[in-house]
Image (cartoon, rainbow, N blue to C red):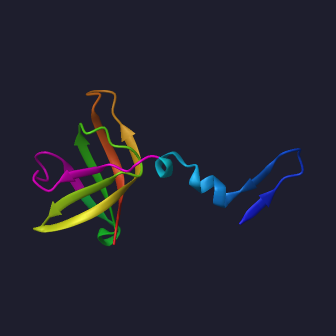
Amino acid sequence: MTIEYTGANSFISFRNLTKRLPWRSKRQKLHDYTTDQNGVDYVFDRVNGGTQGCLTAQGGNPQVGDQVVLKLDEVVEKYEIATLDRYATPPDLWTALLVKIK
């Protein structure tokens, strides 16, 4: 899809724009929580029938686009970080909306 504006040099191609998104240009990190316990080391709540979830954890310095692996009910599930919010105190506490990877 392409959009053109009337101003000088204001041509935008969505194909090129997506390639330049920050989480697309950097290498994704994998955050493994399979050996940690839900409710103790992190808090994870499933939403939308398990296709998404809200994760609150500390440390790890995650970024949008990174992947998270969780062991829930003895099943390993993989998610991608869609949005991320950091808390002021403690500074390494964060919460993220995760989208399940099929």
Q: Nearer the viewer, residue 31 or 54?
A: 31
Q: Position of residue 27 (x, y in %)?
A: 40, 49
Name which residue lies at 10% across and 53% down. Answer: 35
**Side of 7 where 27 appears, left or right:** left
- In this rendering, the answer to whether 95 lies above or below 49 is above
Quarter of the picture holding the N terminus? bottom right
- In this rendering, the answer to whether 58 lies above or below 100 is above
**Side of 86 where 39 appears, left or right:** left
Q: Nearer the viewer, residue 95 or 16?
A: 16
In which image quadrant can residue 18 be found? bottom right
Quarter of the picture holding the C terminus? bottom left
- In this rendering, the answer to whether 42 lies above or below 91 is below
**Side of 89 where 16 appears, left or right:** right
Tell me how many marks there are: 0
Q: Position of residue 73 (x, y in %)?
A: 12, 67
Name which residue lies at 26% across and 46% down. Answer: 56
In which image quadrant can residue 51 be found? bottom left
Residue 46: say if magenta: no
Q: Nearer the viewer, residue 33 or 28?
A: 28
Magenta-highlighted stretch: main secondary structure? loop
Residue 36: say if magenta: yes
Q: Position of residue 19 (x, y in %)?
A: 57, 54
Name which residue lies at 18% across and 47% down. Answer: 42
Q: Which residues are magenta?
A: 26-44
